[in-house]
Image (spheres, rainbow, N blue to C red):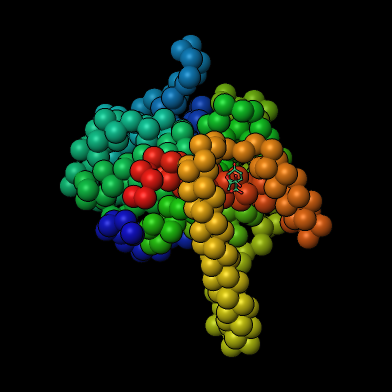
């Protein structure tokens, strides 16, 4: 089922200076000079469509730099006047919304730490009633797509139709190469549920370091995301926040040049015919896979009944070990990724266990 969001197409409310859409600027506005100098360098690249800057910064522990506050809004206003770039800031309270609106900020975004809290999102939504301004909603810190959708719905219900999502990755207990796990599948799920909702990728927060930004940005574009939000600072080495993940405007410009832009579709007849042929083959194979899984489940059902009638346990670890070993060897010989086939087999096994549990709980002859 698709989400019922009332949306206006992105290109009707945002002038995209250069494909792909790029929202860039420092993690935090630190001083007027830092913001203005960065803004000018970004504008000069000709690749930036929107200037971002954190004015109020949510910090995990007290005592860290929590943003310059309202004074930063006057710097942003000046940056806009001097560069012509529209501006975007994060808002987390009704007061932030009011101040940002009063200062003429062009785009607001709801941060990941706010999206997790329906009270906060509702407070922001209420402050936005009757206001016509674009709002971008970052994914929640935790990998819960319902929270992300809920926040988008709350803002949309307040009458905001210039709406977009920002994919900034998800917190995970295990430490990996990423600061925030991309969990691309959640962004794909959101895109599937709301195909008209623009999704902007934020490689800076996913990566947490400069080195991976290129790779993540390219992947986001290949997943047909509508744009990128990348943190850029005049001199990242002295940045007051997120120093490791910010790039200079010059590095940002190079990074953008290295991206390959691919289209979601092309009209060329040869290409579409060949694609249609290949897809017909995929359709046939998918039908066979489903049919074979259904046949397998019928046998699982018989085994379940047989076990129930003979008082034998559902789980048979030895048998399952054998299956995993044999199938993995086979999959590996066929050059399949073992992580993928492992997950697939585990999924099939847990469905067999679920099915047999149902049978065990059924009365005999029922
Ligand atoms: C089907 C059985 O029950 C369970 C499910 C299995 C499967 O799906 O292949 C294998 C072992 C058991 O844990 C069985 O015992 O063979």
Q: What residue is at 48 percent from the left and 48 percent from the top?
A: 305
Q: Name the residue furthest left.
A: 130
Residue 90 vs 134, above or below: the answer is above
317 and 154: which is toward the camera: 317
Q: Name the residue furthest bottom.
A: 269
Q: Position of residue 79 (x, y in %)?
A: 46, 41
* Image quadrant in which the N terminus is located: bottom left
20 and 270: which is toward the camera: 270
The answer to whether residue 51 of the structure is visible from this angle is: no
In this rendering, would 55 be left or right of 336? Answer: left
Q: Name the residue furthest right.
A: 333
Q: Position of residue 42 (x, y in %)?
A: 57, 47
The answer to whether residue 116 of the structure is visible from this angle is: yes
**Number of disc labels:** 0
113 and 304: which is toward the camera: 304
Q: Position of residue 171 (x, y in %)?
A: 53, 31
Q: Position of residue 76 (x, y in %)?
A: 42, 38
Q: What residue is at 61 percent from the left and 82 percent from the top?
A: 277
Q: What residue is at 78 percent from the left and 60 percent from the top?
A: 334
Instruction: Classify residue 219 by image quadrant.
Output: bottom right
Residue 18 vs 315, above or below: the answer is below
Q: What residue is at 52 percent from the left and 47 percent from the top?
A: 306
In this rendering, would 78 be left or right of 25? Answer: left
Q: Name the residue furthest top.
A: 63
Instruction: Classify residue 324 by image quadrant.
Output: top right
């Amino acid at each position: 089922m698709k989400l019922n969001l009332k949306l206006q197409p992105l290109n009707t409310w945002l002038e995209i200076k250069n494909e792909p859409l790029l929202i860039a600027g420092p993690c935090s506005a630190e001083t007027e000079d830092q913001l203005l100098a960065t803004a000018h360098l970004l504008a000069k690249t000709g690749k930036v469509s929107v200037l971002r800057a954190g004015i109020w910064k949510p910090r995990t522990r007290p005592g860290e730099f929590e943003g310059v506050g309202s004074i930063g809004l006057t710097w942003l206003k000046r940056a806009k006047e001097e560069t012509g770039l529209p501006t975007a800031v994060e808002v987390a309270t009704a007061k932030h919304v009011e101040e940002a609106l009063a200062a003429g900020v062009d785009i607001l975004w709801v941060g990941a730490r706010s999206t997790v809290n329906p009270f906060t999102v509702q407070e922001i939504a209420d402050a936005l009633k009757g206001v016509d301004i674009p709002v971008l909603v970052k994914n929640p810190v935790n990998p819960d797509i319902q929270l992300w959708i809920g926040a988008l719905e709350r803002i949309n219900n307040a009458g905001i139709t210039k709406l977009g999502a920002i994919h900034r990755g998800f917190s995970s207990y295990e430490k990996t190469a990423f600061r925030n796990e991309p969990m691309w599948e959640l962004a794909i799920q959101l895109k599937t549920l709301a195909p008209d909702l623009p999704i902007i990728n934020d490689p800076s927060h996913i990566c947490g370091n400069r080195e991976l930004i290129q790779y993540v940005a390219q992947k986001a574009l290949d997943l047909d995301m509508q744009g990128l939000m990348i943190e850029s600072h005049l001199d990242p080495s002295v940045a007051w926040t997120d120093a490791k993940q910010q790039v200079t405007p010059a590095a940002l410009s190079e990074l953008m040049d290295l991206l390959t832009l691919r289209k979601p579709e092309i009209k060329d007849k040869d290409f579409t015919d060949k694609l249609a042929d290949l897809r017909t083959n995929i359709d046939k194979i998918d039908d066979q896979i489903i049919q074979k899984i259904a046949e397998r489940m019928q046998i699982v059902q018989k085994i379940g009944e047989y076990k129930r009638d003979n008082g034998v346990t559902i789980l048979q670890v030895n048998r399952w070990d054998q299956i995993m070993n044999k199938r993995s060897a086979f999959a590996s010989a066929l050059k399949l990724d073992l992580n993928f086939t492992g997950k697939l087999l585990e999924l099939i096994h847990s469905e067999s266990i679920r099915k047999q549990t149902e049978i065990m709980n059924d009365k005999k002859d029922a």
